[in-house]
Image (tube, rainbow, N blue to C red):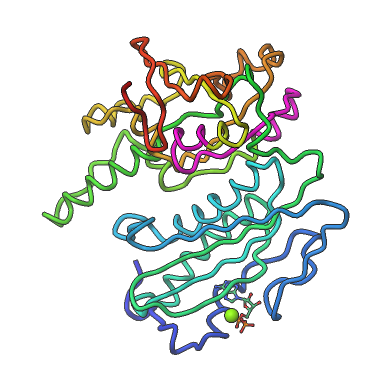
Amino acid sequence: MLNNNNITTIESLGEFRFIDRITQHFKLKNSSTKKGIGDDAAVLDFGSKKTLVSTELFTEGIHFNLMYFPLKHLGYKTVVSGISDIYAMNATPKQITISLAISNKFSVESIEELYSGIQLACEKYHVDLVGGDTTASLTGLSIGITVIGEADDKDIIYRKGASPNDLLCITGDLGGAYMGLQLLERENEVFKVNNNMQPQLTGYDYILERQLKPEARADMLEHFRTIDIHPTSMIDVSDGLSSEIMHLCNSSKLGCRLYEEKIPMDNQTKQMAQELNINPLVAVLNGGEDYELLFTIPLEAHGKIKNDPNITIIGNMTKKEEDIHLITTGGSKVKLIAQGWKEE
Ligand code: ADP
Ligand code: MG
């Protein structure tokens, strides 16, 4: 925690010294970054490569709660969530811009905390912070991120490329970030009633990390190259498995069968779901924020992934007429909808 002697108001520095202060430790790493922060625009040069652009906006009270979400983690997660979209195209993120709307409850030091998380993610994923915008807000904090990436045209993987009989696959496991959030929310409610209560978080380090410090699956793209698989379509899981599957199916003009029993979940995810009396399937289908990669590969590539601990086959693509279905562990067939599923 900061003591009062260490609190600087943003007003006392003025906008330009404030931007200098929060961005001073960022060093440029990519040769495609010709000019970063400090002019009217950044200058980028990708030579013969294709350029990819993706933007996200997060607002306090809607996307994050600063009662339990540390600012440093928020900075890190903002970057991860932004670059994950670029990785989901099988491209490499290179530059980011960050835009802030800040109310006067935030000190310079608190925004420096946010930027220390942004910087940590920039180091880890080798991206340059090349600009942004800073403005005032009446209440709360909003953070916008734009990510710029590069790829060879032939390497870009779209949502639309899947074919019938392709295997539907997922990296890692699902539902952890959602159950981590439920745990943090529960402890926050307890704390609001009695602020002498210490949060009960032990034994749940994995799901808390999934919520508070997620990673983008750059490592899996590398892994795909190593095991020589070429996804036909791909998307990252930011909004929950149902809506991501629907995106792949709709873009590829296909149907799909998803098998409940195949969906990979960590034990902590299942345990927390049981403790809170939540169907873990809700965490997976509606939860989101796992930032795993959902992708399809041709049936012939089955042998390359069947024993891979990092990849799970969770279903298969079908003709459009067969629609998008979940086959439950009990064997019934239900229709998937954008937020969850529907009994027929
Ligand atoms: P302008 O008045 O031309 O919009 P600004 O004063 O907003 O310029 O920004 C000056 C420089 O600082 C620009 O390079 C801009 O991209 C960068 N910048 C502004 N706000 C941020 C921020 N929150 N994070 C990172 N860079 C920023
Ligand atoms: Mg500006």
Residue at left offset 47%, top offset 21%: 258
Residue found at the very far right of the displayed protein: 48
Q: Position of residue 143 (x, y in %)?
A: 48, 65
In this view, the residue in front, 71 or 54, is 54
The reply to whether residue 20 is visible in this rendering is no
Residue found at the very far left of the displayed protein: 193
Q: Position of residue 180 (x, y in %)?
A: 35, 40
Residue at left offset 75%, top offset 55%: 51
The reply to whether residue 307 is visible in this rendering is yes
Q: In the picture shown, does residue 76 fall above or below 22?
A: above
Q: Position of residue 226 (x, y in %)?
A: 75, 27
Q: Quadrant of the C terminus?
A: top left
Residue 158 in the figure: left or right of residue 314: right
Residue 72 in the figure: left or right of residue 21: left
Indicate yes or no whether the magenta region holds residue 180.
no
In this view, the residue in front, 5 or 309, is 309
**What segment carries the magenta color?**
220-246
Q: Position of residue 269 (x, y in %)?
A: 35, 30
Q: In the picture shown, does residue 113 fall above or below 230?
A: below
